[in-house]
Image (cartoon, grey):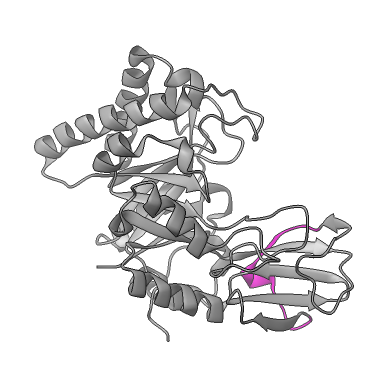
């Protein structure tokens, strides 16, 4: 079965799921738990009651907790020792029991990197891999206790195959969630494009090829889809990609894209962009999501991972990546 998995952020989770949304999804990743003092913390989450309602209303929908997110620290010191990894894994199990979850999704951005302004170490890739192994052992024990299948996944930056030791990590993971969005550089570019081009920083196809080459099986790869748009301002050229821009504008969700933006399709990258004045907005729309769904099916990938569901409150995009609309 092809998975359609969507992140839903606690800070924007202000309306209940509809039947139409739930029918398009297999999994929801509730975002984000944090690592505080070496433990998974959920004390800051405000929409627990809404999540519990979702679980009651749609019991067949699998619900995971995502831990981390951009700029979320605490991982590196927590996994630096065997004792720390045990403490973190044990706290994750406690949270899963408390929230009646189906899985845990580790969203450390990115092991071994301080790009997000967080603590890191060159030992992070090995240490986080050992955390995953220990966590899987604990999940297996809890499965025997409850009879309920429990999953473990990771969100991985596009192209960052070096962040994990795949020979050890892959056997203890259900999915590897590729963040094939935010693929930006020093020029105006598509940010979640399927195919490569000279004017694109990277592409979905290149990302998948890199992970497969590193030993990640296609059957465990979830392809990232963006339900939001990056804005590049100060781009006057008729064809903007590969050109300089003045500044990044404020990103916005798909629900905020209105008819004042002119839609243009780029066949080479199989992605759409939208133009208004000298501003360019680039992300996924119905046509690019249709292309991604076809690619998932053609290449035998596990499915899609979406950031994020609150941006598509009108359920305009979700049916396309879910294969409900063609």
- The answer to whether residue 259 is magenta is yes
Q: Residue at x 55, y 70 (%)?
A: 195
Q: Which residues are magenta?
A: 249-260
Q: Identify the residue shown where x is 83% and y is 76%.
A: 276
**In what quadrant of the picture does the C terminus appear?**
bottom left
Query: Above or below — where is 273 with respect to 81?
Result: below
- Residue 276 vs 77, above or below: the answer is below
Q: Is residue 12 left or right of residue 221?
A: right
Observer-nearest residue: 1 or 124? 124
* Closer to us: 300 or 264: 300
Taking depth in this image into account, of 167 and 148 the one nearest to the observer is: 167
For residue 191: magenta?
no
Is 137 displayed left or right of 46 in the figure? left
Q: Quadrant of residue 114?
A: top right
Percent position (x, y) of residue 236? 89, 72
Side (left or right) of 96 relative to 38:
left
Report the residue at 54% width, 76% height from top: 288
């Amino acid at each position: 079965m092809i998975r359609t998995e969507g992140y839903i952020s606690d800070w924007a989770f202000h309306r209940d799921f509809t039947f139409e949304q739930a029918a398009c999804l297999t999994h929801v990743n509730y975002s984000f738990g944090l690592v505080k003092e070496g433990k998974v913390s959920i004390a800051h989450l405000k929409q627990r009651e809404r999540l519990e309602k979702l679980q009651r209303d749609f019991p067949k929908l699998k619900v995971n907790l995502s831990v981390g997110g951009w700029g979320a620290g605490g991982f590196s010191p927590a996994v630096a020792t065997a004792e720390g990894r045990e403490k973190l894994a044990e706290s994750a199990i406690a949270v899963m029991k408390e929230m009646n979850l189906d899985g845990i999704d580790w969203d450390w951005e990115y092991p071994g990197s301080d790009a997000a302004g967080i603590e890191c170490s060159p030992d992070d890739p090995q240490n986080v891999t050992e955390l995953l192994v220990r966590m899987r052992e604990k999940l297996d024990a809890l499965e025997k206790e409850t009879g309920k299948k429990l999953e473990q996944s990771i969100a991985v930056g596009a192209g960052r195959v070096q962040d994990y030791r795949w020979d050890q990590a892959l056997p203890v993971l259900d999915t590897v969630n590729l963040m094939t969005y935010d693929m930006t550089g020093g020029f105006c570019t598509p940010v979640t494009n399927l195919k490569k081009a000279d004017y694109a920083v990277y592409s979905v196809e290149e990302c998948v090829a890199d992970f497969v080459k590193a030993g990640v099986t296609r059957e465990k790869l979830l392809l990232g889809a963006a339900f939001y748009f990056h804005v590049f301002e100060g781009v006057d050229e008729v064809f903007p990609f590969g050109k300089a821009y003045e500044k990044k504008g404020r990103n916005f969700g798909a629900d905020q894209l209105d008819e004042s933006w002119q839609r243009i399709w780029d066949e080479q990258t199989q992605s759409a962009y939208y133009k208004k004045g000298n501003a360019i907005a680039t992300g996924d729309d119905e046509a690019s999501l249709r292309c991604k769904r076809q690619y998932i099916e053609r290449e035998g990938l596990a499915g899609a991972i979406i950031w994020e569901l609150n941006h598509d409150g009108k359920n305009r995009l979700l049916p396309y990546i879910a294969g409900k609309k063609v």
